Image: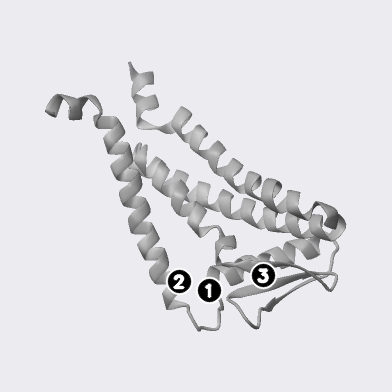
Amino acid sequence: MFQLFRKYRSVLQFVLIFMGSYFIFTILYNGYLSFFEGSNYYPDFFTHLVALQSEAVIESFGYTSKIMVHPDEASLQLYVNDVFLARIVEGCNSISIIILFTSFILSFFAKFKMTILYIFTGAVLIYIANILRIVILAIGIYEYPQYTSFLHTIVFPLIIYGTVFILWIFWVRLFSKNTVDEKAI
């Protein structure tokens, strides 16, 4: 049994660190969400912030944009040129994706400073990619309503998950402890 554990130690370590950190961050995030229930930032501060920033970026492309609190649910309505196009819900704020990204990076922990800096940089890039995907979706739906389904089910997830995947690959290939150790040999 001990030899089996030793043989698969790195795999077990990855799984335990990934699942443990994901579980802890998710519990903390759910606590955060429950704190904001019924506050001025409805549905929550980060979702509200993402909506405001998406609105600003859409306007930088020459469109008129506005967000409004949905009267019946925990979401914000996004309008482009006075046309309702999308609801921005808690899942649109990229925090869950950042938690997934962070848990993976922690599972391939390298030097402390490098790991923390990469997590911070990756989180910022994911957040920016998330804003851009909302903007692309909103403008795309406004300009090409016939492609709404394609934009929402293919392009929308491809942008955010593609960003995360590229960041993971980059980390594993260039910065993970295993890669650093191999270069030292």
Earlier along the polypeptide chain: callout 1 or callout 2?
2
Query: Considering depth in this image, is 40 or 74 the residue closer to the camera?
Result: 74
Local crowd at mark 3 within 10 Å, few (<14), some, or many (≥20)? some
Earlier along the polypeptide chain: callout 1 or callout 3?
1
Drawn side of residue 134 relative to residue 164, left or right: right
Drawn side of residue 90 relative to residue 60, left or right: left
Q: SS class of the residue under badge 3?
A: helix
Q: SS class of the residue under badge 2?
A: helix
Residue ID for mark 3: 52
Number of numbered callouts drawn? 3
Q: Answer whether labels 2 and 3 touch (C-beta < 8 Å).
A: no
Above or below, comparing residue 69 to residue 52 in the picture = below
The x and y percentages for residue 101 are 47, 47
Figure quadrant of the N terminus: top left
Looking at the rendered structure, the kind of residue marked 1 is: Asp
Residue drawn at 41 percent across, 42 percent down: 105
The x and y percentages for residue 116 are 40, 47
The x and y percentages for residue 134 are 69, 58
Looking at the rendered structure, the kind of residue marked 3 is: Leu
Residue drawn at 74 percent across, 56 percent down: 137
Figure quadrant of the C terminus: top left
Residue at the top extreme?
Answer: 185
Local crowd at mark 2 within 10 Å, few (<14), some, or many (≥20)? some
Local crowd at mark 1 within 10 Å, few (<14), some, or many (≥20)? many
Looking at the rendered structure, the kind of residue marked 2 is: Leu
Marks 1 and 3 sit apart, C-alpha to C-alpha, by: 12 Å
Q: Answer whether labels 1 and 2 touch (C-beta < 8 Å).
A: yes
Q: SS class of the residue under badge 1?
A: loop
Q: Nearer the viewer, mark 1 or mark 3?
A: 1
Residue ID for mark 1: 44
Residue ID for mark 2: 33
Marks 2 and 3 sit apart, C-alpha to C-alpha, by: 18 Å
